[in-house]
Structure formats: C-alpha cells, structure tokens
Image (cartoon, helix red, strand yellow):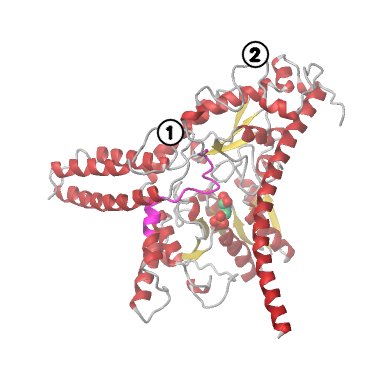
C-alpha cells in the first residue's frame, strides 16, 4: 500500500519534472539565441579592434557598443534607421533567402488541404476507394514532377528531399558496382550533403576526385576528361550552385559521361524548374529534386533514375518495396500532391517567373554594384548564371556585420548550413577568393513572390549601411587615401 | 459561351479577391498575375480558347476565395515595406 503510494507520487513527480524540463528547454533555446547574437557582436568588436591597431589614425578606442550604434561625426544616417518614419511601417523582415527555402505557394497549400482533410487513404491500399483515389493523385503528381525535366513518370522516385536523394545516388550507385568500379568524380563546390556522401564512399574504399572550379565557379571539361579512369563509376556535378548561382555545362558533361559509359548524377535542387533541363538531351542518369525550393512543402523531394540504359543502385532504405524497391516506405499523399502541384506550376509559369526574376535581379545588381569596391561572385555570362541568386562581395566590410545591420532583410552570407558558423564559405574559397572577400559576401535570393518594392528597399538599405559601416572602417579610410593595404606591416598578430 | 462582359466581370472579381490576401507577397503576386494573364490574352478571339480560360478563371476564383480566407485566419506582422494604416479588411 505504502509502496504503491510512493510509486504514484514518484510517477507524478516525473511527470511534473518532464514538464519543467520542457519549460527549461525553451529558455535554453532562447538563451542560445542570445548567445549566438552576442558572439556575432563579439566578432564585430574583434574586427573593430583589429582595424584600430592597424590604423595609426584611428580616432577613438570606443567600445563595440558605441561603435555599432553611434554614427560617425558628420554622418546623417544611423545604422538602425533609414530616412523614413519607422513607426509607419511593419517590422517583419523582407524575405530574400529563397535558396534556403521558398514560401509555400497558396495554390500548393490548396491542393494539400484536400488530403489533410478528407482524402486520407493510404495510396498503397489496393482494396478500397480510399486507397485508389490517393494513389491516382500520387501518380498524377509523379507525372507533373517528371514533365519538368522531360522524364518518364516511371523514372521518378519520391524521397524526403534532395539530401536523401544525393545520398541515395552517390552511395547507391558505387555500392552496386563496387566489384569492378572504384572511382567517383565530383566538384569542390557541391552542397555539403554531396561532399559528405563522397567522403563516406572514401571510407568505403572508393577514390574520389574533387574537380576545382575557375574564378566564376565553373568546372573545366578538360579537367573532367583528364580525371576519368577505367574504373570511374559516377560523375556528380551540381546544376545550379546554391551560393553563387552558377550553372554548370550539363549537356557537355553528360556527353562526356555517356561516351565513357559513366553514370552522370546532378544535384538540381536549385535548378529544377528554374532553368531548362532535359534529362535525355543532357544524358543525365540521376537527378536530385527538392520540393521546398520550388514553393512546395518541406520534407519531400525526388530522384530521377534513368530506365534506359538502366541505372542500378543499392537502395539506402529497404522494406516494403515501394518506389520500384529503391525507396521503401509509405508515401505521404499531402506532401506528394503538394510537390506535384508545385512542379506543375513551375513548368506552367517558368517563362513568367523567369522574366520577373530576371528583371528584379538586373535592377538589384545595378543598384548594388554601383557601390564602390563591390564584386559580383558567379558568372557574367547569362547562359551560365541563374539570375535569382545574386552573390556580391562588399570589400572592407564583414558580411556578418552587414547582416547584423540588416535586421529588416532576411539574407544569408552563404548556404544555410554554413551561415550558422562564422566560417567563410568554402564555395567562395574554391573560386580563389581570399578570406576577406569570402567574409564580405552576401547572397540575395529573388523568387516568384519577391516584389519590385522590396528590391528598391533593399538597394536603398544596403547602400546606406555599407556607407555607414565603411565610414567607421579605418581600412576603408586608408584605401580612400590611396594607401596600399598590402604594404602595411600588421602588428599585434 | 463566355461573353466579354462576363470576362470583364471575372477579371474584376479575381482582382477584388486578390486584394484580400493578408500576406503581402501573395497579395502582390496575385494582383500581378491576374493583371498580366488577362493582358496576355486580350486579343484572343477563338471561342473555345476563351471558354477554357474563362472556366479555369472561375476555378481560380474559388481557390482565391479559400486561400484568402486562410491568409486572413493566419496573420503575421506586417513587412517593413508595408505601410501600417493600409489594407483594412
Ligand atoms: C544544392 C542543394 N542540394 C541539396 C540541398 C538539400 O535539399 P533538402 O533540403 O531537400 O534536403 C540544398 C538545400 O539546401 C541545396 O541547395
């Protein structure tokens, strides 16, 4: 009796405890947020002290706080406010980070709601109407996804996203052919999930060649040809780079691969529906797609796997044999149908979106590159550059401090995975950029829902704040006076 | 058979609905898209094509009705480009 009571009490205690843990974990999140912000402030302070040791003329040794908030003497603007009455406007930042993810199109949501409300059957249930109706919708979605890249619907395998697809392709194909083939070719500027999968294959005994890129981010076809060996099984080159928007020569790469009987995989997460892709014309054997980059829901994507000539791979996820046995598991009809609708819209609106995005992109580039000492990262050739990704370096400014000063615009200084750290981008490094340039770059993402008004705001805000930050920079002052920074002996390091 | 009066009325109804998006970006997109689509097909004379576009416009109107209602149910702070005193519903 007594033990029972104690047990009940203990149970109650654990329950309360777990609730309080919940509460605590909330505070922890909030706390770590504050911490991450303050670490950014520290980096500004660090930069500031670095510069002030460098400059003999540095007027003040003011603390970082006053550096961030007080305008330099004679400056009309402040970091915080532009020249307008802030109280008249909203506070939510403009979203200019569509390479990280895109807003869900209301037409996609409309489609998905059908499944989240009434059409809830398991598409693999073949004995009743609930199953049949969702199965029919799933197959319709598969057709839409295939049509964007001129593939056969049977060649589309639904996955959880481009990360899973990249893993599936880069691990699956070499593993299947491992008895005779031992070599994989990819590039230095791939997304982390491709590079990491390649690293895993190295651990499994494969050789991996990481092709370098030129200053625009493009690989050289001669490098590719030279890297091919008798035992090369797979070439994986991304279509559009997520940080700088450069477009690799897919057709030429595909031709080389086909001639050498090597499988060609491309990570098209940023390219699908945005640039013209024809898997047959380009000889693409495998292709990765992500739904949340095309205004569809997160948590779903697809792998295009060519059927003729057949591409074989070891599946990562096995089980019930769904998706041609390449990716087992029950499909999620709301996600699949939402993804399908997003793909259908990408195809239908491709020209319309492209015209809008190109127009805004040109306006943004013009407005930002007119700032002195700025540089566009990527290609100048419209054939090999996706206009919706504009990556610009602002010399003598640290990208992170500019981002801090731009709380009213949601931007990234690189890919979503690297921007959490203060490490400079490995993609920009691969282009030959030095640390300073890599640190001073910002990516602007323009999409279907970006407006001209937003672009105008961004141009004005960046112009003002770059000017402000540079006015505080002793380095900038020295450059203005014609001092060659390379000739300076830096003390204190 | 969709008459030109019906087409014009559909255009007005669609635009009216588009303004009801609480979300700035969806609202601006819907306005732009409706405007540009009607402009693109202004010179159309084939009755069959007009009918088919008209019917898809009717579907869009129903979809806008649903989606603007949802946009009004789940609202967020106004963007920094949005004046605060506008867009009362
Ligand atoms: C080029 C590239 N590949 C892969 C991914 C990962 O896609 P997902 O989020 O669908 O896993 C991304 C998105 O961050 C990407 O930009």
Say which element carries label 1: loop
Residue A469, horizontal then vertical, whole percent? 66, 25
Residue A94, horizontal then vertical, whole percent? 50, 37
Span shown in magenta: A93-111
Q: Is residue A21 above or below residue A379?
A: below
| Of the pair A366 and B30, the residue shown nearer to us | B30
Residue A359, horizontal then vertical, whole percent? 43, 33
Closer mark to the observer between disc 1 and disc 2: 1
Say which element carries label 2: loop
Instruction: Tell me where residue A443 sits by quadrant.
Output: top right
Q: Chain of mark 2?
A: A
Circle 1 Cα neighbour tier, 10 Å, few/some/many (<14 / 14–19 / ≥20) = some
Examine the rendering and report whether any part of residue A257 can be seen.
no
**Image check: B15 left or right of A118?**
left
**Image check: A49 left or right of A250?**
right
Instruction: Tell me where residue A140 sits by quadrant.
Output: bottom left
Q: Are marks 1 and 2 in contact (CB under 8 Å)?
A: no
Q: Is residue A434 above or below residue A472?
A: below
| Of the pair A297 and A16, the residue shown nearer to us | A16
The N terminus of chain A sits in image quarter: bottom right
The residue where tag 1 is placed is B84
Instruction: Report how far apart the C-alphas of labels 1 and 2 lie in the structure.
Output: 32 Å
Of the numbered discs in the image, which one, if any, rests on residue A433? none
What residue is shown at x 73% (from left), y 83% (from top)? Answer: A3
The residue where tag 2 is placed is A74
The C terminus of chain A sits in image quarter: top right
**Image check: B3 left or right of A366?**
left
């Amino acid at each position: 009796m007594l033990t029972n009571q104690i047990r009940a009490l203990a149970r109650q205690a654990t329950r309360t405890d777990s609730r309080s843990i919940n509460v605590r974990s909330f505070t922890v999140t909030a706390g770590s947020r504050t911490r991450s912000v303050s670490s950014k402030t520290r980096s500004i302070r660090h930069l500031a002290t670095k510069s002030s040791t460098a400059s003999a003329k540095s007027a003040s040794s003011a603390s970082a706080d006053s550096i961030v908030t007080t305008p330099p003497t004679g400056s009309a603007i402040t970091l915080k406010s532009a020249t307008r009455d802030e109280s008249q406007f909203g506070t939510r930042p403009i979203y200019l980070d569509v390479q990280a993810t895109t807003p869900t199109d209301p037409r996609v949501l409309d489609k998905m709601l059908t499944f989240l409300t009434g059409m809830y059957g398991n598409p693999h249930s073949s004995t009743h109407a609930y199953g049949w109706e969702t199965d029919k919708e799933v197959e319709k979605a598969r057709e839409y996804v295939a049509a964007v890249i001129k593939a056969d619907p049977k060649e589309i395998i639904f996955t959880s996203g481009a990360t899973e697809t990249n893993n599936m392709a880069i691990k699956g194909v070499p593993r299947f052919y491992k008895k005779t083939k031992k070599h994989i070719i990819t590039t230095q500027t791939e997304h982390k999930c491709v590079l990491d999968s390649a690293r895993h294959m190295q651990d499994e005994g494969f050789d991996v060649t990481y092709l370098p890129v030129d200053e625009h981010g493009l690989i050289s076809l001669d490098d590719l040809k030279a890297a091919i060996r008798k035992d090369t099984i797979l070439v994986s080159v991304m279509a559009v780079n997520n940080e700088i928007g450069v477009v690799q020569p897919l057709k030429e790469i595909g031709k080389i691969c086909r001639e050498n009987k090597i499988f060609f995989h491309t990570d098209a997460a940023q390219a699908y529906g945005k640039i013209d892709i024809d898997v047959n014309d380009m000889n693409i054997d495998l292709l990765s797609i992500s739904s949340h980059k095309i205004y569809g829901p997160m948590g779903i994507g697809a792998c295009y796997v060519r059927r003729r000539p057949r591409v074989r791979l070891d599946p990562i996820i096995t089980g019930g044999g769904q998706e041609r046995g390449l990716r087992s598991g029950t499909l999620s009809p709301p996600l699949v149908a939402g993804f399908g609708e997003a793909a259908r819209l990408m195809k239908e609106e491709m020209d319309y979106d492209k015209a809008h995005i190109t127009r805004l992109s040109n306006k943004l580039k013009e407005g930002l590159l007119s700032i002195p000492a700025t540089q566009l990262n990527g290609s100048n050739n419209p054939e090999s550059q996706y206009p919706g990704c504009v990556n610009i370096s602002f010399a003598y400014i640290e990208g992170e401090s500019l981002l801090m000063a731009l709380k009213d615009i949601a931007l990234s200084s690189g890919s979503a995975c690297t921007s959490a750290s203060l490490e400079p981008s490995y993609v920009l490094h691969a282009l030959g950029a030095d640390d300073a340039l890599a640190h001073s770059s910002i990516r602007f993402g323009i999409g279907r829902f970006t407006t001209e008004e937003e672009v105008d705001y961004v141009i004005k805000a960046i112009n003002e704040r770059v000017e402000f930050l540079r006015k505080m920079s002793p380095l900038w002052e020295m450059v203005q006076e014609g001092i060659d920074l390379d000739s300076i002996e830096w003390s204190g390091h | 058979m969709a008459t030109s009066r019906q087409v014009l009325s559909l255009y007005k109804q669609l635009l009216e609905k588009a303004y009801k998006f609480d979300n700035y970006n969806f609202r601006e997109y819907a306005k732009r898209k409706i405007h540009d689509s009607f402009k693109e097909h202004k010179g159309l004379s084939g009755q069959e094509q007009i009918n088919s576009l008209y019917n898809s416009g009717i579907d869009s109107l129903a979809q806008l009705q649903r989606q603007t209602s949802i946009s009004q149910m789940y609202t967020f702070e106004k963007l920094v480009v949005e004046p605060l005193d506008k867009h009362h519903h």
